[in-house]
Structures are given as structure tokens and as C-alpha cells.
């Protein structure tokens, strides 16, 4: 345990590639997609407790999710659940938490881990975080990069200064955007790239200094909000100032320019990480087998002459598959998704079409 280490869990987003299971009002981190009764958020909390006690865990979440987060994590002090009135992307959320922590302890180390990831080896994860903390104590902005298992196009990449060694810190030369399949294959073949899982560890003072340099338009309103914390004007200032913060990811706002300055390092991790970003991944990781189909959840499913399909039976009724292959079938009470398995990354486009047609009640 360390009283110098605070852990922040950004719990936002609606998981659009997992629609219609994941919705704006019930995002994926609140669902039990871990193979147990624990939600992704609760599983995240469980693997953090070897590092810190609950009073050093902070969750940043939206207004509509705050009650559910508090219910799922009763051990976390209510004061540590930081509520953002509307989504402003990861830089605002992480900056808010960093400024709150810095107000109490400017020398604290802060680690940030998303609420909706799955990790197969929590012990190796804890060891990797501890190695990253040591780098943060030296003043570096640390990431935890993931050792690639293949040329994935759904992740960003970190270009290392040399072939990465798990558990050993080394400088990051640059952040790379999500690549094409051909470029991803080149990255993996070179052995010099890691997946960017947006896992960060730093001294809060070092992060806020970098934020002041690169994105003062994010830092200044956050400082106004934190200055009003615990005053009669707290709610009014939050409501008025938060919407003015630019929407930008912390990767782009701080880590990319800081990496170009030589201030970012990474500790490679190899602990069975997945962001459970789509139904194909979910089926591979957590499913039960039903005569050629992977079933996610406890609903009733029957399959006949079915191959390489994924079924998510959450609609309260029987789902039957006959003579099909390579399908995703997601059944919920008010929406049914049927898609080719190789189009699972495009489910987000369905949610965009729903917005265009004004069918926001299904989001």
C-alpha cells in the first residue's frame, strides 16, 4: 500500500461498438462482462485494491452514471466520485482528478486506468504498475504499453526507443494513430511497437505542468472548478465552466507533444489485456459454446448447423440460429442487431445512423 499513490478510473463513454447491449444510460463498464457477476467497473476496482486502499481510488463519471457507480463501488468514498456534467473527453476528466488530488497532495503519484478493460493476470498487472510508479517518481510521464499479440488496427501504437522488454522502462519516441492492416503488420514485425491502452502513471505536479504548457485552455477552467470545490458556489461553477472545456483526448493533448520532448516513457505490460471493444472480442474472451456459436450471457439459445457466430441473448426470449455462419446476433428488449462478424468494428456506424434519423431513444 502507498499513501502517495492515487488511482483514477475514468468511467465514461457509451461503448458504441457494443450497441445495443451498451447504451448511453447503461454503458459497458456497468455490465457483468467479466465471466463473473462482477461488472467491468467492479473488476477494475478489484485489481486496484492490492495497490491502494479505497480512499485513494477516484472515479470520474457522468451525471447519469454517478448513482450506479456509487452503488457498485460502496467502498469508495462518495467524495471520490467526481461527476462531470457532460462528456468532454479524457483530458478534461483526468485533469479534473489530477487537480483535485494535487490540492490535497501536490507530490502525489497518480495512475489512470479505464473502467471497461479486462485483464487476465492481475498479479502481473500490479507488478507492471509498480514499475511505472518508480518511473513517475523520477518525474517522467509514464505509460503502460501492451505487448501486441497481432497486427490490430483498432488500437493506437507507441514507438519505443528499442525493442521493449516487459517490466523495463524505456523512452517513447512517438504516439502513432490507429494504422491500416498493412502498417500494423509492419509495426508488429519490427518488434519496436506497443499498443497504446491509455494507461498512465505520473506525478500530478508533472502532469499539470505539462498540461499548462500544452493545453492551458483545459487546465485553467479545471482549476476554477477545483478552487470552488467545497464552497457554496461549487455546483454553479461546475455547471457554468465545465461546458467551456475543449473536448480532447489526453493522448493528443499532453502525451504526444510531451513524447516529442523526450518526457514520456513506458513500461511494457504482458498481462492478458483487452478493451472488450466489440462483440467479436467479447465472444472470443468470455463466451460459452453452443454448437458452433459463442454465447455471451445466460439467456436461452439453441443452434443448428451454425458456425463461428456470437450470440448475446439479453432480450428475455429464446434465440435460435439455423444454418448460419460468421454472424453477430445481439438481442435486447427493444433492439436487435444482426451483423456479419467481420463487420463488428462498424457497429458504431449504426449508432451514428440512429442519431441522424433522430432515433436517440435507442442509444
Image: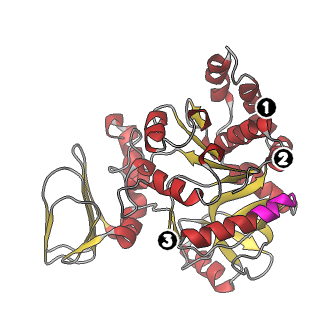
Look at the magenta stretch and give its main secondary structure. Answer: helix
| First in residue order: circle 3 vs circle 1 | 3
Please indicate, yes or no, whether residue 157 appears anywhere in the rendered image. Answer: no
Residue where numbered disc 3 is placed: 120
Residue where numbered disc 1 is placed: 220
In terms of depth relative to the viewer, which is nearer, 111 or 199? 111
In terms of depth relative to the viewer, which is nearer, 184 or 129? 129
Around disc 1, counting alpha carbons within 10 Å, would you say few (fewer than 14), some (14 to 19), or many (20 or more)? some
User: Separation of disc 1 and disc 2 at Cα?
Assistant: 20 Å
Where on the picture, by quarter, is residue 92?
A: top right
Type of colouring: secondary structure
Image vertical order of residue 350 relative to residue 238, above or below: below
- For the record, the magenta segment spans 133-140
Residue where numbered disc 2 is placed: 107
Residue at left 74%, top 83%?
163
Q: Tell me where residue 222 appears, x and y as whole percent.
A: 73, 32
Residue 138 belongs to the span the image colors magenta: yes
Q: Tell me where residue 193 appears, x and y as whole percent.
A: 68, 76
Amino acid at each position: 500500500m502507498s499513501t502517495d499513490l492515487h488511482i483514477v478510473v475514468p468511467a465514461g463513454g457509451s461503448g458504441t461498438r457494443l450497441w445495443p447491449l451498451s447504451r448511453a444510460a447503461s454503458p459497458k463498464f456497468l455490465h457483468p462482462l467479466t465471466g463473473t457477476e462482477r461488472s467491468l467497473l467492479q473488476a477494475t476496482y478489484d485489481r486496484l485494491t492490492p495497490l491502494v486502499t479505497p480512499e485513494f481510488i477516484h472515479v470520474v463519471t457522468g451525471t447519469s452514471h454517478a448513482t450506479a457507480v456509487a452503488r457498485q463501488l460502496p467502498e469508495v468514498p462518495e467524495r471520490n466520485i467526481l461527476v462531470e456534467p457532460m462528456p468532454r473527453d479524457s483530458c478534461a476528466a483526468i485533469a479534473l482528478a489530477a487537480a483535485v488530488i494535487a490540492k490535497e497532495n501536490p507530490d502525489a503519484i497518480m495512475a489512470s486506468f479505464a473502467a471497461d478493460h479486462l485483464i487476465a493476470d492481475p498479479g502481473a498487472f500490479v507488478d507492471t504498475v509498480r514499475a511505472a510508479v518508480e518511473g513517475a517518481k523520477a518525474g517522467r510521464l509514464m505509460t503502460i504499453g501492451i505487448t501486441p499479440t497481432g497486427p490490430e488496427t483498432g488500437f493506437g501504437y507507441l514507438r519505443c526507443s528499442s525493442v521493449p522488454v516487459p517490466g523495463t522502462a524505456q523512452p517513447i519516441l512517438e504516439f502513432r494513430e490507429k494504422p491500416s492492416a498493412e502498417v500494423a503488420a509492419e509495426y508488429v514485425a519490427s518488434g519496436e511497437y506497443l499498443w497504446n491502452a491509455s494507461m498512465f502513471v505520473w506525478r500530478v505536479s508533472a502532469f499539470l505542468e505539462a498540461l499548462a504548457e500544452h493545453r492551458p485552455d483545459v487546465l485553467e477552467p479545471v482549476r476554477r472548478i477545483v478552487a470552488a470545490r467545497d464552497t457554496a458556489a461549487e455546483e454553479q461553477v461546475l455547471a457554468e465552466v465545465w461546458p467551456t472545456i475543449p473536448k480532447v483526448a489526453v493522448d493528443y493533448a499532453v502525451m504526444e507533444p510531451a513524447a516529442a520532448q523526450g518526457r514520456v516513457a513506458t513500461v511494457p505490460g504482458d498481462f492478458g489485456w483487452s478493451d472488450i471493444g466489440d462483440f467479436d472480442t467479447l465472444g472470443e474472451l468470455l463466451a460459452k459454446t453452443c454448437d458452433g456459436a459463442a454465447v455471451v450471457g445466460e439467456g436461452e439459445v439453441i443452434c443448428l448447423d451454425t458456425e463461428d457466430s456470437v450470440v448475446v441473448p439479453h432480450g428475455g426470449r429464446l434465440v435460435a440460429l439455423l444454418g448460419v455462419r460468421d454472424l453477430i446476433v445481439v438481442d435486447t428488449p427493444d433492439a436487435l442487431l444482426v451483423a456479419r462478424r467481420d463487420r463488428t468494428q462498424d457497429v458504431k456506424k449504426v449508432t451514428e445512423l440512429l442519431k441522424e434519423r433522430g432515433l436517440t431513444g435507442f442509444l
